[in-house]
Image (tube, helix red, strand yellow):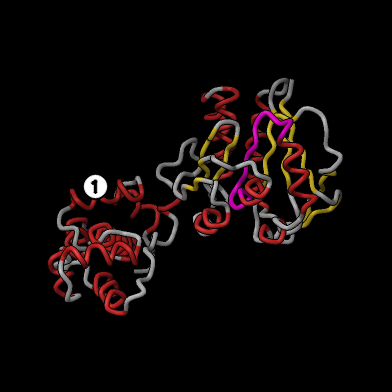
Amino acid sequence: MQRRVLIVVFPGFQLLDMAGPADVFGTAALLRPTDGYRVELIAVNPGAVTAGNGVTVTASSLGEAAGPVDTLLVAGGLSVPEQVADRELIAGIARLAAGARRVASVCNGAFLLAEAGLLDHRRVTTHWLVAGELKSRYDRVEVDADPLYIEDGDVWTSAGVLSGVDLALALVARDHGHALARTVARGLVVYLHRPGGQSQFSTPMRAMTPRSEPLRELQAYIDANPAADLSVPALAARARMSERHFSRVFTEQTGLSPGRYVERSRADTARRLLEVTGLPLDAVARESGLGRPETLYRVFRRHWRVSPGDHRRRFQSKER
């Protein structure tokens, strides 16, 4: 028996959030016609629904959707902040989720699941740009901005846009095994498991801006001089504070210890050097203040779960 997949769309939804998973499930259905998937689009207002890029799709009525649901998947899009206030949409998602085997979201579609109360006390992810907002708006939700997707019980959430493909492949693997998921991935010419998390694509995970002007100046100094002596004694002396007082105040006002902030700043410098220069790894390590290639490698693996060489191959600018 085919597994019924309902994808919730709305005016202004992100087309790739819908089309990526739909193609994964559709390809799997071609390979498993008897027990694959049947994809249906649903929306509050049935009929034509226009995505954020102007492409129009046809959806059935969310309010009239009934019967067994294997997977309820909610797309994201730039219009999600408006859709969160749509009580009919949120109630419809909650109603269908109650009878679905599992629920999933792509990108900031997680906000719609959260508004429906489906993410309370669960670990979830969303697009790195809005992860902080999701965390502050829904304080019962545990947000992790790095993974491409997260499974927490019968709720799956995925990160930005094309991570919906990663999520759908993981669902196919769970349902039918990795061999089928691998065949689908090869057919679509995508990774079955992409290395790293979405932080490798994001802007740096910055600390808070300190309230204190001297600490703001010190923060700017750290970012501008990664190869300088940025030890706690040196930074405390520059801030004209005792080491203990400096460490406490810096951590309170930035949310990071001095050592953690310095490492992040140096890692970000190294990342920029890898992307825009052809410097060898030992020079990148030296100029970013990380010292040795071994440290550069260790820091990259810790922050972005990829090696410096892999990052350079993926993101290096061709215009140097």
Q: Write down the region rendered in magenta.
A: 98-110
Can residue 68 be seen from the camera position used here? Answer: yes
Amino acid identity at mark 1: Arg
In the picture, residue 291 is in which quadrant? bottom left
As helix, strand or loop, the secondary structure at mark 1 comes to helix
Q: Quadrant of the C terminus?
A: bottom left
Residue 272: x %, y % from top left: 33, 64
Q: Is residue 230 left or right of residue 250?
A: left
* Residue placed under numbered mark 1 in the picture: 298
Asked whether, in this view, residue 182 is left or right of residue 234, the answer is: right
State yes or no: residue 243 in magenta. Answer: no
Query: Which residue is pictured at 57% across the width and 56% down the height?
Result: 137
How many numbered markers are drawn?
A: 1
Name the residue at 63% across, 37% down. Answer: 24
Residue 252: x, y in percent? 32, 63
Task: Say which of 2 and 309 sits in front.
Answer: 2
Give the image location of residue 140, x and y in percent: 55, 46
Q: Is residue 231 above or below residue 180?
A: below
* 244 in relation to 63, above or below: below
Tag 1: Cα neighbours inside 10 Å, few (<14), some, or many (≥20)?
some
Query: In the depicted view, which residue is nearer to us: 246 or 188?
Result: 246
Indicate the position of residue 199 as horizontal and vertical percent values.
42, 53
> Does 101 appear in magenta?
yes
**Residue for point 74% across, 30% down:** 99
Residue 37 figure quarter: top right
Instruction: Indicate the quadrant containing the N terminus: top left, top right, bottom left or bottom right.
Output: top right
Q: Could one spot residue 278 in this view of the protein?
A: no
